[in-house]
Structure formats: C-alpha cells, structure tokens
Image: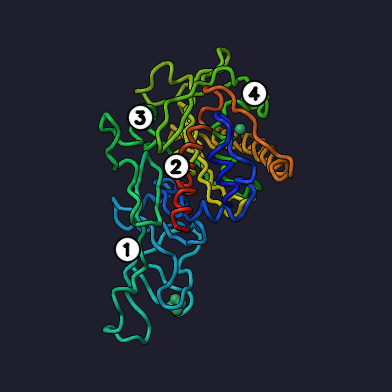
C-alpha cells in the first residue's frame, strides 16, 4: 500500500486519484478504518418514520441498524442485534410498540431498553442488555448516524475564521429550498457495480451531463452552465443552471428566488451522501460501500408538493430511474477501465466542471492521514 500512498500524495497537481484507489480491496479496508467507520452516513429521510413506533432497518459496513421514531420528536438509531445471542431483532420496515427477538423472544422498548426475557429472573437483566444506540442527527430532513462516539457532527463544530461550522455555507446555499419540509415519494435500495467514490465523483461532476445524459438532462442542465460552489472540508457542491428553453418549475417554496427556480443544487456531504435539489424535487443517493467493486445505494425522491398526483409522482420517479440507469451503466464500464494495468489519470477539467472532485479528493487525502505517513513510518522504524 505504501507505493499507492506515494502515488496519491505525489500525483500531479489538478489530477485525480490513482486508479487503484477504486479497485483495491485493501485500500477500501484502509478507507473503512480511517474514514467510513468514523464519519457520518445518511440512512434516509425523517418522514420515512413519521409516527412513534415507525421503524426501518438498514445494514451499513456490516452493521445491522434499526432506525426508529422512539418519541414524537426523537429518532434513534439502534444496533439491530439482540443482546442475548446476536440475532437481528427487527426486519424490514413498519410500526411497532416493541422489538421482539424472533429467536428466544427477548423484548426491547423503542429506546432499546430490554423489557422482558422469558424465564430469566428480572434481577439478571443487566443494563448492558439494552440495544446500543449510535450517535444520530437530523439535518434538513436527512437522518445521519455515526459509528464512532468521538466524531462530532460537522454542524456542531465551530471553526473557520468567521466562526462558521463546516456545513454553514451549504446550509445557507440551499436554505430556500426547505428540504426539511419536502415529502418522500419513494425510495429504493440497489447495488451498483462500481466503487463508491466513482459514484460520488460522477454525481458531482457537471462535465459528464451533456455526454452521458443527452436526452434526459442536456436540454435542461447542460454542462456549459454548471457553476461550482465554494466547498469546505465537510461538503462540496455545484449549481446546474437551466437552459433558457427549460420549462419553468411552477410549484415551489415561496422563499425561492427567481434564479433558484431555474437551478438545481447538487451537493455531497462527505463522505457519501449525494443529492440534487430543485424547486420541486429532491433526489438523494446514500452510498454504503460493500467492497471496492460494489456499493449499496439507497436512493429516494421527495417532492415539494404534498398532494402530487400518482401519475406525476411516477413520471418524476421514472425520469430519475432513467438518469440513474445511464449513470450506472457508464460507471460499470468505467470500473472495468480502472482495473486495467494501463489505467492512469489525466488532468481534471476546469473548476466549474470538475472542481468538486478536487474538494472530495482533498477531503479524502486529509482524512486518510497519509500526508505524514512516510515520516511517521520512518520514525517508528528508528
Ligand atoms: S438471540 Fe435474541 S432472544 Fe436469543
Ligand atoms: Fe449523471
């Protein structure tokens, strides 16, 4: 791996990451230990669990989780693993007033506390028998969780020269869209045959829009009108401006400016939530890496309108299924190219088209902790 670290650190300025970063399972394990297990991941949308007792299950980095509305104003992300002998206690999604393990019927309250265990005396039910709860946050209608106890939510970090937290600029940039009050129309879970970083980069690259999506996007958001937004060490973003001939979006939050009704804002909250919000539609993809070659994608679509007809809802979903299919296909082909012994990486396109990739790479390299690795290793060897 040392040679790969050297290649990453010493790549020419303005170039992408070496191809092996996308194909090597050892590198994914390194990413997992240095980034994925300690950073914040999106699990879905708050309005997937509107009522007390609503829950859904999801596995992330081999960690079975249950997301539950435990009280009117509180969502918990619990370990979905029974404290008796390790059985997942919940399956799928639904509404319940307790989680009952299907193996020996230990029963847990919505906050994870053990309530009953058949034939076990009460005094033997220890506090540590509760389902562990992970750190979680609701942000603009997204549910995030973090496996590590140590990592602060970026929105809680005060920090830059103006005293703003690292997500503040993005929050301000998308505030008028009011994603927190949009309505979930559908969500899907798929496995894409590519590296998770390729999918982040593809979504955040305006350069491919006119080439890969000639029918679905080029007439609306051509590459030439993309404009990079200033990023931070917690996010990157760009604005896809609409072509003059693109139809106006009629329904939207009254706080949107005229310009904003003719723009989509695409953003990535590092490491692995990517989203596009327009006047009337939010689409997000929450990425959960499975291996160097495969990534689980939970993607969902929310609408500004609460009373959208089924036909219109279906039309928006089908359009995004088409866009995603175009991206999935190109990323599968990219992945086979990246595995070539002759694969290399050229210079990235200008700031407005691929500057978001530079932000992402800067974030990755700083979190991987490899900038000072050679000196650390030589110190250790002395
Ligand atoms: S494994 Fe859950 S009750 Fe036994
Ligand atoms: Fe795309």
Q: Between marks 3 and 2, how big is the CA–CA gap?
A: 20 Å
For image coordinates 45% across by 58% down, the residue present is: 382
Q: Which of the four quarters of the rendered structure image does ligand 1 lie in? A: bottom left
Q: Name the element at disc 1.
A: loop
Q: Name the element at disc 2.
A: helix
Q: Nearer the viewer, mark 3 or mark 1?
A: 3
For image coordinates 43% across by 36% down, the residue present is: 235
Q: Name the element at disc 3.
A: helix
Q: Nearer the viewer, mark 3 or mark 2?
A: 2
Residue placed most toward the observer, 208 or 85: 208
N-terminal-most mark, 1 or 4 = 1
Is 225 left or right of 260, judged from the image as shown? right
Q: Dividing the picture into quarters, in which one does residue 71 lie? A: bottom left
Q: Name the element at disc 4.
A: helix
Tell me the crowding category of disc 2: few under 14, some 14 to 19, or many 20 or more residues within 10 angstroms, Cα based.
Answer: some
Q: Is residue 315 visible?
A: no
**Residue 27 locus on image (x, y percent):** 57, 52
Q: Nearer the viewer, mark 2 or mark 4?
A: 2
Which circle marks residue 210 in the picture? 4
**Residue 344 locus on image (x, y percent):** 68, 37
Q: Are marks 1 and 4 in contact (CB under 8 Å)?
A: no
Q: Dividing the picture into quarters, in which one does residue 163 lie? A: top left
Which circle marks residue 169 in the picture? 3
Which circle marks residue 168 in the picture? none
Residue placed most toward the observer, 340 or 321: 340
Q: Between marks 2 and 1, how big is the CA–CA gap?
A: 36 Å
Q: Is residue 90 visible?
A: yes
């Amino acid at each position: 791996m040392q040679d790969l670290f050297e290649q990453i650190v010493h790549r020419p300025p303005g170039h992408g990451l070496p191809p092996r970063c996308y194909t090597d399972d050892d590198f994914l394990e390194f990413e997992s230990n240095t980034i994925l297990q300690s950073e914040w991941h999106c699990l879905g949308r708050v309005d997937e669990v509107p009522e007390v007792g609503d829950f859904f299950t999801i596995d992330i980095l081999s960690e079975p989780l249950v997301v539950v509305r435990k009280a009117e104003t509180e969502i918990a992300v619990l370990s979905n693993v029974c404290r008796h002998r390790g059985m997942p206690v919940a399956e799928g999604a639904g509404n319940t007033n307790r989680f009952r393990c299907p193996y020996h019927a230990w029963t847990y309250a919505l906050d994870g506390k053990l309530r009953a265990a058949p034939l076990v005396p009460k005094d033997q039910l220890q506090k540590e028998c509760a389902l562990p709860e992970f750190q979680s946050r609701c942000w603009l209608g997204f549910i995030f969780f973090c496996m590590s106890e140590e990592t602060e939510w970026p929105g809680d970090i005060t920090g830059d020269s103006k005293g703003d937290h690292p997500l503040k600029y993005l929050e301000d940039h998308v505030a008028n869209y009011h994603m927190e009050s949009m309505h979930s129309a559908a969500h899907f879970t798929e496995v894409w045959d590519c590296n998770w970083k390729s999918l982040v980069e593809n979504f955040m690259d305006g350069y491919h829009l006119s080439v890969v999506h000639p029918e679905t996007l080029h007439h609306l958001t051509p590459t030439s009108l993309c404009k990079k937004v200033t990023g931070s060490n917690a996010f990157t973003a760009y604005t896809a401006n609409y072509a003059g001939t693109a139809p106006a979006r009629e329904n939207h939050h009254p706080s949107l400016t005229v310009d904003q009704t003719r723009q989509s804002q695409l953003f990535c909250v590092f490491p692995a939530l990517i989203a596009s919000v327009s006047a009337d539609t939010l689409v997000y993809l929450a990425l959960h890496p499975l291996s160097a070659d495969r990534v689980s994608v939970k993607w969902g679509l929310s609408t500004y309108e609460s009373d959208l007809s089924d036909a219109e809802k279906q039309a928006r979903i089908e359009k995004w299924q088409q866009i995603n299919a175009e991206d999935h296909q190109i990323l599968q082909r990219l992945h086979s190219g990246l595995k070539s012994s002759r694969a290399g990486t050229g210079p990235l396109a200008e700031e407005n088209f691929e500057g978001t990739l530079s932000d992402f790479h800067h974030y990755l390299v700083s979190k991987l902790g490899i900038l000072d690795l050679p000196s650390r290793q030589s110190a250790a060897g002395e």
